[in-house]
């Protein structure tokens, strides 16, 4: 049994990063069709298998012509060229009606917009076959209104680098290049559990003294938004024997080995803190971090008899404490591995005075808007409504006991999403 640790926020963040870096090494890959790859991380760099666009095409509706044929005399109009069909070479002295996106025929080197033609409407099929003529401007630059082959990207050019987080625009680019499947990193498998005999799953009826379990939903959705594959086992009870049995069963039930087990609750100084009581003998260190909310923390490599070692992180049970712990410790560790965007920090002006307990980093929730930060919920760690209404945190250092209204602070933008 190890002595309880006492760490700074920076020390614990570094410890969690080490655990996650080791746990998520070599996640493996899988190949997915594009519409299943949103939010996934590209496993290897991609190069363009073809030119984009694949051939010269018209940028607008107009006439495909050769600039050598432009002059004072009207040009004979030939059969129109529609998008999606091949086009015969343009005969000298003629103009071909061409639609936006249609291939530019051989022999043509510019497109004259229909608005610049006289008449400025396309002829009917009957008119075209009867020798319809059109008067066009006497001069035009070669290449005008033509999207040339490879002007977007050339065959063999780099497209996306390894580690790219695939979003709508990058997936759209791959689709435009004709790439139907993509190889991505497997999502880290995380087993998530909550503890507490007082917890009841959402939708269940509460007995006296019970509350609904918010942490499973709160943390599972945060992890999934970050790119993890999450398995939940609900709430494990506070009996040490049942807890060990249920945890062991959950570790066996996964289709693949878990990269990480994350728990919430059961790690404070209470008489029934089962996670701490049991797992302190199986490789997990517990202690406190100089932060409020979220002081009690645990981490290590779980060595449960009969099971492969697995990284284990323990958060406190109050929902705000658990979520603050995720944002302060786990998400930063996941960000580099899963190519997450870093949380934005903005300078804000406090709208009201904030007082703080010395000796601990205070994480206060609130709303950032138009350069101001309005605190919500105070220091209490159970106020879910205030957390849900917040879109940012401010961090008050250990030596500050009061910040007057009007003070400049750094707002860490959070909100829903990854």
Image (cartoon, rainbow, N blue to C red):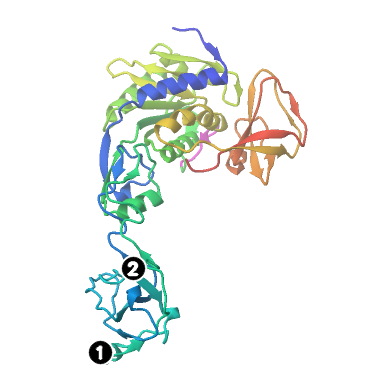
Gap in angstroms between the C-alphas marked 1 and 2: 24 Å
List the residue tagged with mark 1: 129
Q: Secondary structure at mark 2?
A: loop
Asked if residue 145 lies in the magenta stretch, the reply is: no
Q: Is residue 242 visible?
A: no
Closer to us: 301 or 282? 301
What's drawn in magenta, residue-wise? Answer: 204-212
Query: Which residue lies at the image location 48% right of the left edge and 38% below the top edge?
Result: 341
Closer to us: 91 or 155? 91
Left or right, 182 with respect to 228, comes to left
Find residue 353 and report its image quarter.
top right
**Could you tell me residue 53's position as x and y percent?**
31, 59
List the residue tagged with mark 2: 101
**Could you tell me residue 156's position as x and y percent?**
27, 46
Q: Secondary structure at mark 1?
A: helix
Badge 1 local density, few (<14 within 10 Å), some, or many (20+)?
Answer: few
Q: Which label sits on residue 194?
A: none
Q: Is residue 106 above or below residue 5?
A: below
Point out the frontmost of discs 1 and 2.
1
Mark 1 near mark 2, Cβ–Cβ under 8 Å? no
**Could you tell me residue 397's position as x and y percent?**
66, 23
Closer to us: 236 or 24? 24
Closer to us: 40 or 214? 40
Find residue 408 and report its image quarter.
top right
Left or right, 213 with respect to 82, comes to right
Badge 2 local density, few (<14 within 10 Å), some, or many (20+)?
Answer: many
Find residue 216 and report its image quarter.
top left
Query: Which residue lies at the image location 68% right of the left edge and 43% below the top edge?
Result: 371
Query: Which residue lies at the image location 70% right of the left edge and 22% below the top edge?
Result: 357
**Could you tell me residue 260's position as x and y percent?**
37, 26
């Amino acid at each position: 049994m190890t002595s309880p640790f006492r760490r700074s926020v920076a020390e614990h963040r570094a410890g969690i990063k080490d655990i996650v870096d080791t746990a998520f090494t070599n996640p493996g890959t899988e190949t997915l069709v594009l519409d299943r790859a949103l939010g996934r991380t590209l496993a290897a760099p991609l190069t363009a298998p073809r030119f984009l666009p694949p051939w010269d095409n018209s940028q607008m509706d107009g006439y495909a012509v050769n600039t050598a044929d432009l002059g004072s005399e009207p040009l004979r109009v030939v059969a129109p060229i529609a998008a999606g069909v091949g086009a015969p070479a343009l005969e000298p002295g003629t103009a071909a009606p061409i639609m936006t996106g249609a291939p530019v025929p051989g022999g043509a080197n510019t497109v004259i917009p229909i608005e610049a033609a006289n008449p400025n409407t396309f002829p009917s099929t009957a008119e075209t076959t009867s020798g319809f003529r059109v008067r066009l401007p006497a001069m035009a630059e070669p290449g005008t209104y033509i999207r040339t082959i490879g002007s977007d990207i050339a065959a063999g050019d780099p497209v996306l680098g390894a580690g790219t987080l695939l979003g709508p625009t990058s997936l759209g680019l791959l689709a435009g290049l004709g790439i139907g499947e993509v190889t991505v990193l497997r999502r880290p498998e995380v087993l998530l559990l909550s503890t507490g005999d007082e917890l009841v799953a959402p939708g269940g009826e509460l007995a006296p003294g019970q509350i609904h379990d918010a942490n499973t939903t709160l943390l599972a959705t945060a992890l999934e938004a970050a790119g993890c594959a999450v398995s939940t086992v609900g709430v494990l009870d506070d009996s040490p024997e049942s807890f060990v049995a249920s945890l062991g069963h959950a570790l066996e039930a996964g289709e693949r080995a878990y990269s990480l087990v994350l728990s919430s609750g059961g790690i404070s100084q209470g008489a029934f803190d089962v996670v701490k009581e049991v797992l302190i003998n199986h490789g997990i260190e517990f202690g406190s971090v100089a932060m409020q909310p979220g002081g009690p923390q645990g981490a290590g490599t779980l060595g449960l008899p009969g099971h492969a070692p697995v990284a284990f992180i323990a958060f406190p049970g109050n929902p705000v404490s658990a979520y603050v712990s995720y944002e302060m410790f786990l998400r930063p560790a996941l960000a580099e591995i899963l190519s997450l965007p870093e949380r934005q920090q903005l300078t804000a002006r406090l709208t009201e005075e904030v007082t703080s307990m010395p000796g601990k980093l205070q994480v206060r929730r609130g709303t950032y808007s138009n350069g101001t930060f309005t605190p919500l919920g105070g220091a209490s760690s159970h106020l879910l409504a205030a957390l849900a209404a917040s879109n940012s945190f401010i961090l008050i250092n250990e030596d500050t006991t009061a910040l007057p209204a009007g003070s400049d602070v750094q707002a860490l933008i959070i909100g829903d999403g990854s």
